[in-house]
Image: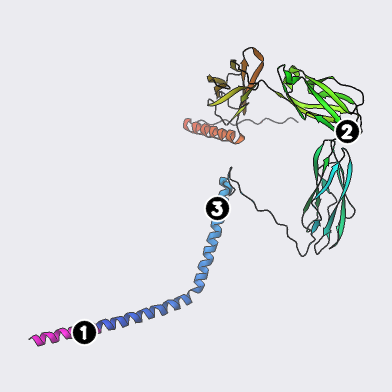
Amino acid sequence: MRVLIKGLLLGALWSIVLFSAGGCTAVAGKKEALSSETTTVNKLETPAAKEKKESVATLKNDVQRILKKSRKTTGVSDKPGPGIKVKRAKKKVSRREDAGFLTVDKKVYDFGTVEPRQQVTGEFMLKNEGSEPLEINKRIRASCGCTKPILKTYHLKPGESVPLTVKYTVGSNPGVTSKKIWVLSEPPALPERLTMSVKAKVKPVVNVTPEEFRFEIRDGTQNNTSLILESTDGIPFRVLSVASRGNAVKAQKYSHKKDTKHIISVKVNPKELKKSPSGMITIKLDHPKLKRVVRRYKAVLPFSAYPSSKSFYNMKPGESRNVMIRIVSNYGQDFQVDKIVSEKGLIKVLKKSKTNDGYQVNISFTVPENNRSKKYIRDNLLITFKDRPEDSLKVPCYNLISSGYKRDRQRAAGSNRKMINRATGKRSRPVPSVPRKP
């Protein structure tokens, strides 16, 4: 019995092994068949794949066209928004084989130290380094009428050069001065514009001290000063007149005789200086090389407000905004604020407090509720000081409504009117057209 059972078990095992080997060979055969079928299918479906690729490309083009239309209708652009800086690459001018190329031997011509009102002459060499002839525009531009460029020929063959003569009449003010010149070439020549410059250093013929005046509105020691003029080339001259805007600065005493050195005493008119706190003092001379000298003056006001003016934007009717203003003394003296008043009543003082260097005032600016059509609203805050009513300050406050904000507000009002008319069943009456006069 045991021998029979062992024989049966061995036969069953052998049958299982043979069956599994046959299955593996069958599976391998199926895999080979499938691989051969897929290769044949791929070979057969290549035109269909091409059609599919073409359809995908057309779909992409349609999507891009629809996006462009949506950008135009919605106003969305690919440009960067405000505050985003984009560095643009500089265009490199390269030579072309079928066009002329204009060059210059130097970009800057320095005349060195020259006399006032002196006319000097310099030359730039222009050359065509291209393979084709080029034409230069006959309109050679300069940044000032004192600079006159002269060119003999405007047609250059390949390798040909021509001098550009520049006549420059310098000014009378001492210091470094410079002017620019632009030479344009006709297309297809490159570059389209060639930039050059001339510069010179004007030698001072008459030294004037001080270079700038600073005065006070109140009567003080700085308001009585002197102006010194001294010849540097040894040529004597006369002072013809001393003038300023509104006679805010006057000359008291000066000699009308010819001399190499003049001392002019200057006095300030506080009332006129307050009207024009900054300007120029013009001194006319009879020097052969210099006819006038100009010096700047500036008045230091007793008090200042920071900020000196305040601007608001796109405030709605009835809206209020707060701001803080500092009031300081420019003379370093102690002071007291007497009154703070609004001209039109749009500004209210919320808090006033004393500080180490002056006062701190918190104010509120309110747009009136009946403001429906005005784009620009202004009110002034008047600040007066004790014992110094003439030194009052004026701080203007503005509200500016931009055109885009106003247009959106008008559209919103129109849509609300339409909704009300639909709800009530009313119709807006059309505006009758007015006939034109013959």
Residue 352 got which mark? none
Which numbered disc, 2 or 1, marks the residue closer to the eye?
2
The answer to whether the residue labelled 3 contacts the one labelled 1, judged by CB atoms less than 8 Å apart, is no
Q: Distance from label 2 to label 3 (Cα)?
A: 68 Å
- In the displayed structure image, the side of residue 160 where residue 20 appears, left or right: left
Q: Give the residue furthest to the left.
A: 1
Q: Distance from label 3 to label 1 (Cα)?
A: 69 Å
Residue 374 seen in this snapshot = no
Circle 1 SS class: helix
Q: Which is nearer the eye, 207 or 58?
A: 207
**For mark 2, what is the residue?**
290
Point out the tag, 2 or 1, that comes first from the N-terminus.
1
Magenta region, residue range: 1-18
The answer to whether the residue labelled 2 contacts the one labelled 3, judged by CB atoms less than 8 Å apart, is no
Amino acid under disc 3: Leu
Seen at 62% across and 16% down, the residue is: 384
**For mark 3, what is the residue?**
67
Considering only vertical position in the picture, is 266 above or below 182?
above
The x, y position of residue 16, in whole percent, is 22, 82
Point out the tag, 2 or 3, that comes first from the N-terminus.
3
Amino acid under disc 1: Ser
**For mark 1, what is the residue?**
15
The x, y position of residue 6, in whole percent, is 13, 85
